[in-house]
Amino acid sequence: MSRKVMIMDHPLIAHKLSILRNENTPSVQFRTLINEISQLMVFEATRDLETEPVDVKTPCGVAKCRQLSGKKLAFVPILRAGIGMLDGVMELVPSARVGHIGLYRDEETLEPHEYYCKLPHDIAEREVFVVDPMLATGGSACDAIKLIKKRKPKKISFLCTVAAPCGLEKLKEEHPDVDIYCAALDDGLNENGYIIPGLGDAGDRIFGTK
Ligand code: PRP
Ligand code: URA
């Protein structure tokens, strides 16, 4: 099966994004919205999970049902802003394991620098969803996925809220086997490497820093 690159096209996501982007939206509402959007995205990103038949006894008979068969998922937020998506996705898949990758972008060079990496010990048996609200130059996403690939997971998908075209192209080129889901694809980057129109600094808006 060829890999998926999906720019989400859904009225609920579009509506929530319009409030998320607004510079006057406070952190408390920003956090709620980014989790809600992530939840809607993971709903789509898990569409191909395998299921198996199961008979379930209801009060009125036996229902032919389906349950997840693989069940082994892991979410990996890229610190810090990726943490803002975690509650939303975990609500839909509470049994998933969570790994963390810490990367910060040098403000001058825009190069990512790793400062933390802790992944589930059995990640090789899991399907991994990397989450980060922003795909700007693509450097952070590509490096995080490189780190995860060393541990040979079954599959990797990347979920972001807003992507810039150059970041999306870099990710597609460097990781042609990774499915990509973006809530929005924006116009480009400004001279400081911020997505335009974007939503500003996602980490600062989630955590109320700055
Ligand atoms: C932001 C964002 C991504 C990265 C995207 O993190 O959360 O990880 O920038 O930019 P890139 O595609 O050009 O690499 P940042 O480095 O600002 O760190 P923070 O989450 O700790 O604020
Ligand atoms: N990181 C952010 O938080 N926002 C951007 O627009 C780009 C990178």
Image: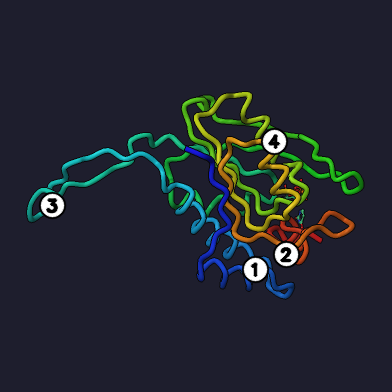
Tag 1: residue type?
A: Leu
Mark 3 is on which residue type? Thr
Decide if ligand 1 comes within 8 Å of the CB at mark 4. no
Question: Is 101 located above or below residue 165 in the figure?
Answer: above
Q: Earlier in the sequence, mark 4 or mark 2?
A: 4
Residue under label 1, please give it: 20
Q: Amino acid at mark 4?
A: Glu
Task: Decide which of tag 3 and tag 4 comes sooner along the chain.
Answer: 3
Mark 4 and mark 2 in contact? Answer it, CB < 8 Å: no
**Quarter assignment of residue 29:** bottom right
Q: Is mark 2 within 8 Å of ligand 2?
A: yes
Which numbered disc, 3 or 1, marks the residue that appears first in the sequence? Answer: 1
Give the CA separation, mark 2 to mark 1: 7 Å
- CA separation in Å, label 2 and label 3: 47 Å
Q: Are marks 1 and 4 in contact (CB under 8 Å)?
A: no
Depth check, mark 2 against mark 3: the one in front is 2
Separation of residues labelled 1 and 4 (CA atoms) = 29 Å
3D distance between C-alphas at marks 3 and 4 = 49 Å
Crowd band around label 3 with a 10 angstrom C-alpha radius: few (<14), some (14–19), many (20+): few
Q: Identify the residue under disc 4.
A: 174
